[in-house]
Amino acid sequence: MANKIPRVSVREQEPALRATNFEEVCYGYNEQEAQTEASRCLNCKNPRCVAACPVGIDIPAFIKKITEGDYSAASSIIAKDSSLPSICGRVCPQETQCEGSCILGIKGEPVAIGKLERFVGDWSLENESDAELTIQSNGHKVAVIGSGPAGLACASDLAKWGYEVTVFEALHKLGGVLVYGIPEFRLPKEKIVAREIDSLRRLGVKFETDVVVGRTITIDSLLDDEGFDAVFIGSGAGLPRFMGISGENLNGVVSANEFLTRANLMRAYDDEYDTPIFVGKKVVVVGGGNVAMDAVRTAKRLGADAVIVYRRSEAELPARKEEVHHAKEEGIEFKMLTNPTEVIGNDKGWVRGLRCVEMELGEPDESGRRSPIEKPNSDFEVECDVVIMALGTSPNPLLKRTTAGLETNRRGCIVTNEQGATTREGVFAGGDAVTGAATVILAMGAGRTAAKAIDEYVKNKAK
Amino acid sequence: MFKIVEKRTLADNIYLLRIEAPRVAQSALPGQFVIVRVDEQGERVPLTIADFDKEQGTVTIVIQAIGVSTRKLCTLGEGDMIADFAGPLGNPSEFVEMSADELSKRRFLFVAGGVGTAPVYPQVKWLHERGAKVDVIIGAKTASMLIYTEQMKRVCDNLYIATDDGSCGFKGMVTAKIKQLIDEEGKQYNECIAIGPMIMMKFVTLTTREYSLRTTVSLNALMVDGTGMCGACRVSVGGKTRFTCVDGPEFDGHEVDFDEAMRRQAMYRSQESNASVKHEHKCNCYGK
């Protein structure tokens, strides 16, 4: 019986060692491990994993191809629904999606779908990425704003269909949150992200960095002066939130975005780079999402004692289980049911501590999670010299301000229909810019949905 | 990559670079800034635009070689390439929204200090071309540190120089010169715009407050991305936290908490000086 085989555990860098470097934590499966793990799949008639995948990858089919050793076919099956398997295999919250609904998970361990996807994606990058492609141009031009997961996925499909696609990126490096947000130890930049982008270049996609659409150029100028038939906005959710508590502007308080951008995009951990970063002796990261985990594990690797402070309990942590598990292995301290009320400074205006209160859980709120309530007279001080705020992000209002007819909702997210069309003709959007901060896979899916809508729009207009 | 088409030494350690950046030049307006990254290892440095030429597709910046990245930038010459040049960023000066008719009725006083003199120039030029009356005070420690005096003379009504040691023009601080112009010469202004070191802008706003003279300042806060992502440039204005990069860089100077802004500007100073030592060391090695 296939399901008697235990889940193949994945090889990882030793926690004590990896807490001091930025090399990837997880080594992934080799061929033999992948085949053994793939053999555990029951190939269900009504696969619940497919229904639970935000982009509906035919999971049992690609896993079957792994057991047959036909990785190229496995890769083609995934490619029908996903453009970034090496990335999604690494960063998707599988435990709440495909693996969370795997039938084997009821009594035992679910199939390691994420690790298998990563295996196929990496195999393809290694073995298939040199294929020469000749695509006949259809003579239409599409501009993509932002080179994160949504923009890359949208650009990839459109390029395959013959569109001349130009991706405009505000920063100096391509990849969006994949390069400025997610750390190297979770998603290698050169080995994975840069190669995914290279494969788009081979499809004929053009990239322009250092272009801030809304400032350097506008959506109007792209449509009216530069001859683009349509525009896709995949500009993400980049604006950091702060708590609004006293002392937040003290020296030593930074957003997770700033901390991670300095470390990841600007490679402050690498001596060859000129980027300064302030790590201090003890870092408190406020928040419980993946970004909080990334920040706290980065701080640890840069030599600080690192603590997570979160106002609910461990069960409500929005971060992926694997990230929480890895963080604990690396010696991160978790202070749950704790909420900061004030950042305390010394006489020079630098952080010396964080005043917090203890919380307890009350009734569920609109998100379905039990809402935290402050315990009376429970305040205490946590000593620290750096506080990193990882409280979520919202979309940048620049495009709305500079584009007539582009509507956003009260959270600043761009309003679209289900196909990704915005309220402005010829302008489409997807990913975090529409949903607020979410996952790589949802952004990628939205980019592909919008690509279909753009194709229809341009073809109809040409008639 | 962006090409340096012109380089000039303006004063000791202060250089002008004209960069080929057609998209930036096309969209630039007075008051905006750019983010410059010299090479793959360099920092992203925010610099206020000192001039732009839409026809030639060039943008001018003026840099004082102080940190590792600015010093690297200043070692480059004409024809060399810099890795990144992104912009124009931030909001343009408020007056670009005003009609020439409105502007022709207004009197502006600009107070410029150090390298801050360079970004004052495109603002004065813009206003002058639209008929506004503009007086400019340029302050410097000593005559050899003065920049942009000749260009400025051509686009303003009155140019006043103030040096700490009296080696050129008025002897004393720019604030004393402001008082002299208003108290002794009976000058009247609708608005003051001060650009220079934080400490200078702080004292200018303290002085103009006495005259209830509306004063705009351009803040040179620390930034990483310059597009609203990092929040390193947080500044308190009127008790509210604002981001210099997207809400500024120009703010009502009487509302800015300068003491906080100056403290925040120094956040990475110890790291920066370590990096400078490291950089010097590297340079010496290469020289041998």
Image: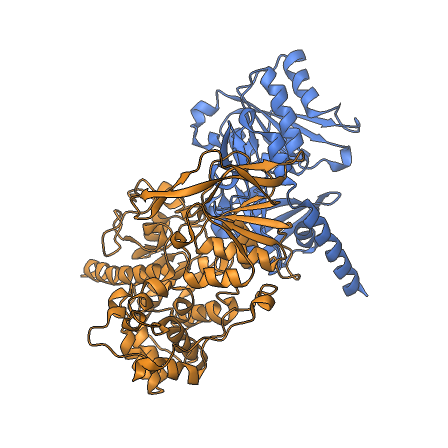
Chain colours: A orange, B blue
Residue A126 place in picture, x, y as percent: 45, 79
Locate residue A115: give its quadrant.
Answer: bottom left
In percent of width and height, residue A247 lies at: 55, 35
State the image coordinates of residue B184 (x, y, percent, origin top left): 67, 12
> Which residue is situated farthest in the bottom direction here?
A68
Residue B197 in percent (x, y) is at 65, 34
Q: Is residue B44 left or right of residue A66?
A: right
Where on the picture, by quarter, is residue A315? bottom left
Residue located 47% across and 51% down the image: B23
Location of the C terminus of chain A (image quadrant): bottom left
Q: Is residue B28 visible?
A: yes
In the picture, measured across the screen, residue B103 lies left or right of residue A20, that is: left
Q: Nearer the viewer, residue B254 or B263?
A: B263
Count numbered badges in the picture: 0
The residue under the point 34% across, 72% down is: A110
Instruction: Residue at 43%, 24% (x, y): give it.
Output: B101
Can residue A210 be seen in this snapshot? no
